[in-house]
Amino acid sequence: MILLLAAEGEEAAALLRRLEGRAQVPGPFPAHRGRFAGREAAVVQTQVGKAAAAAATAWALTAFRARAAFFAGVAGALAPELAQGDLLVALDAVQWDVDLTPFGRAPGELATGERFVPADPRLSALLEEAAGARVGRVASGDRFVADERLARWIRETFKADAVEMEGAAALWTARRFRVPMALLRVVSDQATAGSDVDFALFLAEGSERMAAALERAVARLK
Ligand code: ADE
């Protein structure tokens, strides 16, 4: 069983269009099971933000007994070489808005000492090859970044290539459950003023691009 997670309705809808023989699954988050790229799979819409992503990931990993999981969706670019439509597969992800610095922790460092949560290398390599995605670092926070100064601070502090609102929480949860997970993002905006408009205009196309890339990767999964 392959688990496919996405936060937004449009992102999940692009995955659902590729889920053959789909049937709704009752539960705390919108979920369907069926076949994706010839594999038994479930698509779960986590909804937006780190708390929702962690809760939905925990529920879905348990409910579907997944042996591999992918979290996917759009993201704001921080790296100057990333343009709208580019695919990025996460090497690792950090919660950029976690701040225990008064206790001597680095920005983004949890009380456990965890900071950059690694994605599964095998699934990530598969995405890199099958989807032609670049590899980089994702920064996740409960804030839509539409501000050049904040974007620059996140880039400089964490050496992150893109921002979004779920990936680090989903990867962290999957590690707790010992289920391999990869994180795929397609660039929708540049995380500066006007990014809300770029995001809204590109969400449907970006979701299609992301779902098509995932389909190619899952088809090659051994
Ligand atoms: N997802 C897509 N673009 C984003 C941005 N600029 N900030 C946070 N999450 C995003």
Image: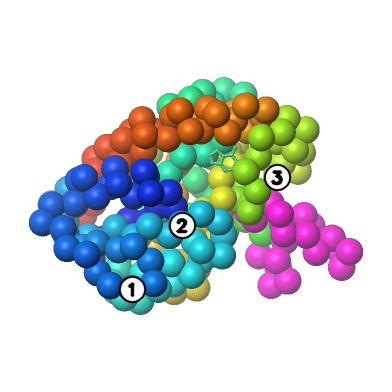
The residue at which mark 3 appears reads as: 158
Quadrant for residue 210, please give it: top left
| Residue name at image x 42 percent, y 35 percent | 203
Residue drawn 57% across and 23% down?
81
Q: Earlier in the sequence, mark 2 or mark 3?
A: 2
Which label lies toward us, 2 or 3? 2
On residue 125, the disc is none
Which residue was labeled with disc 1? 27
Residue 109, given in percent of the width and then of the height, sits at: 72, 61
Residue at the image point whose x is 89% and y is 64% from the top: 102
Q: Which picture quadrant has residue 213?
A: top left
Mark 1 burial class by Cα count in 10 Å: few <14, some 14-19, many 20+: few
Which quadrant of the rendered structure holds the C terminus? bottom left
Element under disc 1: loop
Give the main secondary structure of the magenta stretch.
Answer: loop
Q: Is residue 180 visible?
A: yes
Image coordinates of residue 36 in percent, x first then y, are: 19, 52
Question: On the rendered structure, is 215 left or right of 198?
Answer: left
State the quadrant of the N terminus.
Answer: bottom left
Which mark's residue is nearer the viewer, 3 or 1?
A: 1
Q: Which residue is mark 2?
A: 47
Residue 55 to residue 186: above or below: below
Does ligand 1 reach within 8 Å of label 2's beta carbon?
A: no
Give left or right: position of 39 versus 112: left
Identity of the amino acid at label 3? Phe
> Residues in magenta?
93-114
SS label for mark 3:
helix
